[in-house]
């Protein structure tokens, strides 16, 4: 079974430029997550999709970040314009459907991440 | 806002030593997971605990979920260099997973 695919693996840009990250989840996984991980810290959830609908985007800086999941499969996360503090690893994860209603207990499968450096 | 605090933040030990990592919150979680992350990779699931007081063992790793489902611990017996990595707890509540602050473990040969 193929894992979660992300690209690019590395990206270096200057502040105020734009960047886009792509994620292809595991086939059949309804839920897709984008996390931001600052070096050495735990991942912070940016946005969560269930199929192609947004479940949670409360921590997404909407003035500069946007994400979409067209057709409920692939997803793209965009940053425009980038700031120095956006330097981080952007992790995409996917999981199967929820068990027991709104409670999530399934395993998250992560991609290798996209490392962004903003100069 | 649900927060998960892990302690210690960093841990450097010699091969063969035992250690415990803690994951604490003031919030109740429906389930709690532990992940390990190695440099340049995404986190990988180690275990999921669901019931308060539950204990699970994975070879030399022992995981416990607190009775009140607000905290968890990970105990490693006779640590090995291969245990080196970033350990993350993740609490599951309504709709989403919240990750802890992380514990970076280095086991020296």
Image (cartoon, grey):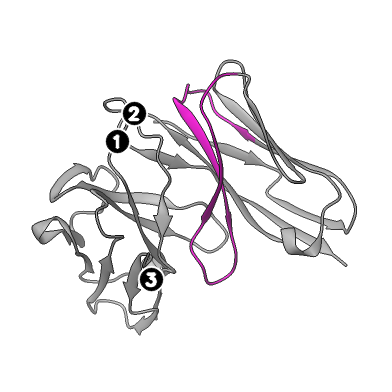
**Numbered mark located on residue A84 in the image:** 3
Helix, strand or loop at label 1? It is loop
Helix, strand or loop at label 2? It is loop
Q: Is residue B60 left or right of residue B51?
A: right
Q: Is residue B62 magenta?
A: no
Decide: marks 1, 3 in contact (CB < 8 A)? no
Helix, strand or loop at label 3? It is helix
Q: Residues within 10 Å of mark 1 (few under 14, many from 20)?
A: some
Decide: marks 3, 2 in contact (CB < 8 A)? no
Decide: marks 1, 2 in contact (CB < 8 A)? yes
**Region rendered in magenta:** B23-52
**Numbered mark located on residue B17 in the image:** none
Residue located beneath label 2 in the image: A103
**In this view, which residue lies farthest toward the left?**
A71
Question: Which residue lies at the image location 86% right of the left edge and 50% below the top edge?
Answer: B78
Image x and y of residue A60, in percent: 26, 51
| Marks 1 and 3, how far apart at CA | 36 Å
Circle 2 marks a residue in which chain? A
**Numbered mark located on residue A98 in the image:** 1
């Amino acid at each position: 079974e193929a894992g979660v695919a992300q690209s690019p693996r590395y990206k270096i840009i200057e502040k105020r430029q734009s960047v886009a990250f792509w994620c292809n989840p595991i086939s059949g996984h309804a839920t897709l997550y984008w996390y931001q991980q600052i070096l050495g810290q735990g991942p912070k959830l940016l946005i969560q999709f269930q199929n192609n609908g947004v479940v949670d985007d409360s921590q997404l800086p909407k003035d500069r970040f946007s994400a979409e999941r067209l057709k409920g499969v692939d997803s793209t996360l965009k940053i425009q314009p980038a700031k120095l503090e956006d330097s981080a690893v952007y992790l995409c994860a996917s999981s199967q459907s929820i068990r027991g209603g709104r409670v999530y207990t399934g395993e998250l499968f992560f991609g290798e991440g996209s490392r962004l450096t903003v100069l | 806002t649900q927060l998960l605090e892990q302690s210690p933040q960093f841990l450097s030990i010699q091969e063969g030593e035992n250690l415990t990592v803690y994951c604490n919150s003031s919030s109740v979680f429906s389930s709690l997971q532990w992940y390990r992350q190695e440099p340049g990779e995404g986190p990988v699931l180690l275990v999921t605990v669901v019931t308060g007081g539950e204990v699970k063992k994975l070879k030399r790793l022992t995981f416990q979920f607190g009775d009140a489902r607000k905290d968890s611990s990970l105990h490693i017996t006779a640590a090995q260099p291969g245990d080196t990595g970033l350990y993350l707890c993740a609490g599951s509540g309504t709709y989403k997973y919240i990750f802890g602050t992380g514990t970076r473990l280095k086991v020296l040969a």
